[in-house]
Each structure stands twice: as structure tokens, then as C-alpha cells.
Amino acid sequence: MDKIQQCILIDGQQKKIEDVVAVARDGAKVIVIEEVQENINRCRMLVEQFVKEERVIYGITTGLGELCKVSVPPEKLSELSRNIIMSHACGMGTPLPHDQVRAIMFSAVLNFSHGHSGVRFETVETLVNMLNLGVVPYVPGQGSVGYLTHMAHISLVMIGMGQAYYNGELYSGKEAMERAGIETLTLGAKEGLSLVNGTVCMTGIGALVVYDAMQLAKWVDIAGAMSFEALKGTRYAFDKRINEVRPYKGQIQVAENLLRLIDGSEIAEKYKDYRVQDALSLRAMPQVHGASRDKIDHALEVILIELNAATDNPLIFETEGGGVSLSSCNAHGEPLAQTMDLLAIAVSELGNISERRIDRLVNPHVSELPAFLVENSGLNTGFMIPQYVASSLVAENKVLSHPISVDSIPMSAYQEDHVSMGTPAALKAYQVIRNVQKVVSIELLTAAQALEFHRPLRFGAGTSLVYQLIREQIPKWTEDRVFYPDLETINREVEENNWINTVEEKIGAI
């Protein structure tokens, strides 16, 4: 099926991380079924009843944060919602990529679909229409402590303000909506708070981060297998018996992946008894890659819970007496904040070990290959400097992997005296992944060049396929040439993951 024809039903069923990717990156259409619409409208009726009864309820008939002590008259509640959006839209810096903005919007739709937020279906429908018709708000990337600013910039467009992209062009929010044929909103009671609340920003971004980390873990195994062959690795380190006495799921999976990737390799067979023991960057791939995989699996569990949760504040529930609004803190992002910090560390480690293999490939003191993988070295520098680039990237990741969730700065006159920093944690993890994708791209290209010196020996079932895919786009190096176009080409393939599917079709899931 053509990706653009995909439809994601909001039907009360659990949504998967692939659904977020389909909407955020592949243009899948979002459809909210009638039963969910009814649940949303039923909850909205409770909000309107609270207002009619003039109940004092946080965020519905009062101000926000420390201003929860200030009551707002019914005729001013629409103005309050509008003011919340305008005052909270104070992000700064480079705008978020379109896929992150769309992921946030989709997460907001899922959050509201539970029917506990009290927004009108008309408001949810506006978000859905923006997704389906390609209106992407301009959202400055910096300024969130976990919620508020990113959704405020998205919400500005919903009320005809701010800026948004449509068909690749940046317009005022009002014009973008007009060009797409979407009516802007006049917000009602509580809607301003609901739109900027919850964990939808860190959840949307985090879902893309986890998906990319899952794919990256596969790439690291592939690149590691190619380096293993090129460096005459001793495959006994991947023996099944080793994993049986230390049965981590990730370790078992990686060892199996490596053996399938190098299956049939004449290089691996020839050198299986060549050394008593390999360097750790080769020998410990199941343990290191596997540990990172286990942390990525944990992150997936957390994201799936969050993606299918109601995280507004307050949350509204039906009761025999007509309904209740409960002010609590499902909007606090601590589960995701800690998870994104841990994920950044796990992915950073994948980059660290990959860079160590790159160094071994180009280093004539340990590689048993021509210096820097070029025959006429001296006149030619070969693959010397890409290892510098990888070193720079992993050094940057060591800073980015410092946890941000351990910090909290009191806000709103101490009413919000502990915040998660979950959204910047997700953005930080996103940057770590982008850096490691580049490192692994360098390893793939370097390992392919190193394998040239083992021909005509046959490569493994998986490694030979990836080698062939690389050579279809990037010729081997016989002398120095401008390097960066080759790096951009291989990095694009790593980011798009198309080759992963090709490899898995041949050797099974990795």
C-alpha cells in the first residue's frame, strides 16, 4: 500500500509507535470514529455544566499555576483560553522539524480521544484536519520544561495566529489555514489549558526517538559484523552457550544477529582460530549492543504507555452526581524524562563502540590492513579523517548524554516547584541518535573499504548484501577524492532505513 494512502483510526484501541511514524513522516490520514467523538463531546458537556454551576475548578474557572487562587467569571473564560495560548507561545530558537511537530499534534489527538480533557470535538477535529491537509505550525525548538511552549505555538495556528507551513511555504497561521480550507477556532472554557497541557510534546518527539533508536540498533549490528570480518574476528565469542549463562535478551539477539550476518563468510571461517581473543570492540558486541537494545526496549514500553494515556490536568470523569474534575499531575513527564535520558546514554554507547571499531579499521598498528585503507598511502590520506569526524561526534554525545531530568528549577511562584524537563530530554536524545547515525555511516563506509582487501574471499550472507548496496552508490577508494558526498549518501541511507528491510528479507529480523 502506498504510504500516503494509509489511514490511522482513532478508535479507542492501543496505538503503536509505527502509527506515530506513519502520521508524522509518511502522511498517513487520521480518522476519529464516531464513538470516540461521542466520548469527547460527553466530557465537554460536563465542562459546560461546571461553568454553568459556577464551580471553582482549576484551569476551568480559575487562572493557572499560582493564579489558581484567582476566579475568572464565565463570560471571560473564552478570553482566558486565548490568553493562555498567546502568553505560553514564547519558545525560542531553531524550529522543530516537521515530523516532530506532526508527532506532537498526533499525540495530542490521542490524548484528547480518551474523553477526559473536556475539549470540544471541534477542537480535536481542527488538529486532525491540520494533519490530514498538511498544515505544519512553526514551532521554536527551545523553551519547554516538559510541556506548554510547543503546543502553544501549534495552538496559535488553530486560532488564526502564529505561523505555519503549507505546501512547503511559510505563511501566517491564518493564511496557512485559509489556503488549506480549515476554519480557525474560538476557544471555550478549559480548552486553552488542555491544548498546552499534558505530556504530548515529549511523547510525540520521544516516539520518533525510540523508533529511530530501534532501527539504529540494527544498523550497528550490521556495521559491527562488517568490521568484524574485515578485522579477522574470532566468532567463538558469539557462541550460544555464552548467552545461556548470562541470558540478557539483547545480548542473545545481537549474538544471533551477528552470526546470521556473517553466515557463509569465507573470511570468518578462515580466521576463526586466528587469535586467542579479539579486542573488546569486536568481542563484546553482544554485551554492549545488547545492553543498549535492552534499554531501547524499556523506552518503547514507556512510550507505548504514554502514547495511550490521558495526561491532561485537570482530568474529568463522569459520576452518578454528574461529573467531577480532578486536579492531579498526569501531566508531569518524569517517566519519560528519565527514560529519554537513559536512552541517550544507551545510544551514545552504540556510537562509542562503533568509533572504536572505525579506529581499528584505519589504524595500521592493529588492523593488519594498509594504513588508512588506501594502497598508496602518504600521497593519499584515505580514511584517516573520517575517524576524526566520528571522534568529534561521540565527544559531543558525551555532553548530550548528561541527564537533564535530575535538574528541576522552581516555577510559577513555587506552585510548580518540580518539573521533569522531559521534552528537552527527548530533544537531546534525538540529537544523540542523529550523531550516532553519522558515526555508524562512517563505520559502514570504512568497513566496506576494508573488506576490499579480503577479496576474492566471500563475505557473509548479510554483510555481502550491504557491501553490494554500498558499492551500487559509492565506488571503492583507489585514491583520494572529495569525501563528504560519500558520507552524505551513506548517512541518508542509514536515516531512511530502506536497506534494513532488504537485509531482513534475506536473513530474517535483526
Image (spheres, grey):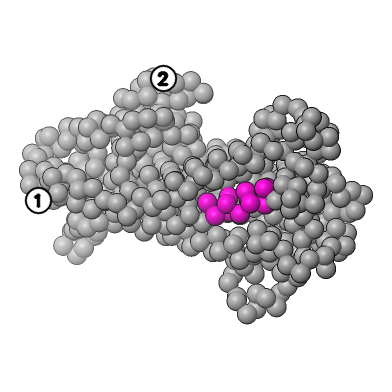
Q: In the shown orientation, is residue 436 left or right of residue 345?
A: right
Along the line of sight, which residue is nearer the eye, 302 or 186? 302
Give residue 70's quadrant in the image. top left
Q: Residues within 10 Å of mark 1 (few under 14, many from 20)?
A: few
Q: In the shown orientation, is residue 240 left or right of residue 136?
A: right
The kind of residue tagged 2 is: Tyr
Mark 2 and mark 1: span between their CA atoms?
A: 41 Å
Q: Which residue is mark 1?
A: 55
Secondary structure type for disc 1: loop
Quadrant containing the C terminus in the rendered view: bottom right
> Of tags 2 and 1, which is closer to the observer?
2
Q: Residue at x 48, y 20 (%)?
A: 169
* Spot occupied by residue 481 in the image (x, y as percentages of width and height): 75, 27
Q: Residue at x 69, y 54 (%)?
A: 224
Along the line of sight, which residue is nearer the eye, 505 or 308? 505
Magenta part mainly helix, strand or loop?
A: helix
Q: Which residue is mark 2?
A: 171
Q: Residues within 10 Å of mark 2 (few under 14, many from 20)?
A: some
- Residue extending farthest to the bottom is 245
* Spot occupied by residue 208 in the image (x, y as percentages of width and height): 50, 46
**Which mark is on residue 436?**
none
* Spot occupied by residue 160 in the image (x, y as percentages of width and height): 32, 25
Give residue 276's quadrant in the image. bottom right
Residues shaded magenta: 347-359
Residue 354: in magenta span: yes
The kind of residue tagged 1 is: Arg
- Residue 112 makes an appearance in the image: no
Give residue 141's quadrant in the image. top left
Residue 358: in magenta span: yes
Mark 2 / mark 1, whichever is N-terminal: 1
